[in-house]
Image (cartoon, coloured by chain):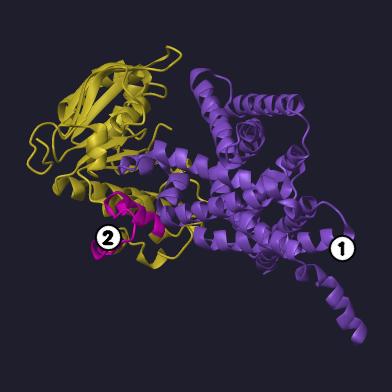
Amino acid sequence: MSSLSETLALFFLPLTLDFMRQALWMGLLVGTVCAVLSCLIVLKGWSLVGDAASHAVVPGIVLAWLAGIPMVIGALGSALCCLLGAGMIERHCRIRPDAVLGIAFTGFLALGMVLVAMVPSDVHFMHILLGNLLGIEASTRYQLIVTGIVVLSVVALKFSDLRLYCFDPQHAQVVGLDTQRLQLLLTVLLTLATVMALQAVGVVLVVAMLVTPGCTAFLLTRRLAAMMMVASASTWLSVFAGVMVSFHVDVETGGVIVLIQAFLFLLAFLLAPGRGVVFQKRRLWHAIRADRAAARE
Amino acid sequence: MSNPHSYDGPVIDVSRTSVRYPDGHLGIQDISLALPRASICALIGPNGSGKSTLCRTILGFTRPTSGRVQLLGMTVRHAQKQNLVAYVPQAEEVDWQFPVSVRDVVMMGRQGQMNWLRIPSATDRRCVEEAMARMEITDLAQRQIGMLSGGQKKRVFLARALAQGSRILVLDEPFTGVDAHTEQGIMALIRGLRDEGVTVLIVTHALSNVPQYCDHVAMVSRRLIAFGPVSTTFNQSHLTATFGDVMAETVLSAVHADTSVPSWSLS
């Protein structure tokens, strides 16, 4: 008995440490913002846009650091330049949108890498590439909290319009909504979520935070609000497990978080009632067996 | 002029409108037509004739490169802001897996008229319930839209347009993929709306039943081939000019021989 409680105490040791608790809180905030946005992104079919935004922020972050302005602003500026620029190119030539986006965001990432190499070396930028929940500086933390609250409030206030825009932009335009403004709004929200996710999992894995929870929740729910809640819950589970495991086993927190998210998706894919593979196969088998029974009679 | 209820000019007024795409490709050329209040007009033409382009221009999705479109004497955008236009899309354009219920979709018809927080008022709720009752989908209100049959799906989007209560209704291929019963239902609804003063524009492939439910017809093949009342315009020479000889023969013989097969369609 005492050995069990000792094991538990050891397992929950990270929660007694200030810096671990802080990492956990930041992870939960970042995770919630990404989960809520991921639902809209998955439904809109913007997964690649999320990936592009995450790579396009790099030069902005370096330039913001050089200019001494808040990192979030630099990141937002550079990602918007990339996405709006790609949109403009796309309208004026016949190359497919995904290819244009591919050129634009790799171009921005390359620019970021060149800038990192030219600027006197600073470990700071490694955090962008790999992410580090455990090492977020106080000034960055403040920016993340403000950004997170802003994004969640805007989604809550504009929920209905954003849902309509993702579902049927043509109808949104016909009933008098400004769809161009809604597109810009969703792009800005997506970029802000990207900047937040960078801190947790780094450039390479951001897209997982912005896609996986939404997909998992899509398989489990039939309403957008419920989808956002399930997506958030799945992310909280991943962040909590990620922080705990990475403390005990000494691996990258971001990697563990994304790995658990992928595992949860796989579970939903197999076992989700209604849309899961097992459920569908079983329903098919029951139907076929009923057909055969009917044919024998 | 800005009051849509006292306006008595043409409700849909397309004048000398051309659309060219950014690559120079021609969409439609120099089309003019004026639809009066309380009328039903079929917009017909072969594939690639520009009838979708004309429809998209009237809805403001595509900007004319010359000429202009006015709705109830206003610009398209102005009319949309005043919720005077409703649009029923083709079934293939809808994401049926989207996590929304039937009632959510019908409520979207009210979206432009709600306050900025989009909290439905008593009027909004009443319009939605009435529209669902009229389309006989009240008992499906809580269903996710993907769990409906083809005819039910169509009725959800018609209910959304009804709930909006607009003066102009544009339908894109409303008769594809629906059974004869639903088709009759849609026609009855359209006629009812016309009698309430709504102007209805229908883009359609189903030619043989045009004389049955439309009072006007516009035939398009890049240019406007013919436009006017069905009784005088829907004839051999115009159909030949739009679709070619063989097609015109087939359509007209179908119309005259057997009007009891209303779902006969070219597509």
- Residue at 56% of width from left, 44% of height from top? A192
Q: Closer to the camera, B171 or B260?
A: B171
Chain in yellow, by letter, is B
User: In which quadrant of the rendered image does the C terminus of chain A lie?
Assistant: bottom right
Position of A160 relative to B203 (above/below): below
10 Å crowding of disc 1: few (<14), some (14-19), many (20+): few
Q: Quadrant of residue B58?
A: top left
Q: Amino acid at mark 1?
A: His
Tell me the residue at 89%/80% (across/down). Answer: A6
Q: Is residue A133 left or right of residue A80?
A: right
Left or right placement of residue B216 versus residue A85 in this view:
left
- Tags 2 and 1 in contact by the CB under 8 Å rule? no
Amino acid type, callout 2: Asp
Residue B234 lies, in percent from the top left, at 22, 26
Identify residue for label 1: A248
Q: Which residues are magenta?
A: B104-128
Q: From the viewer's perspective, is residue A46 above or below residue B223?
A: below
Q: Is A269 a magenta residue?
A: no
Q: Magenta region's main secondary structure? A: helix
Read off the chain for label 1. Answer: A
Image disc number at residue A146: none
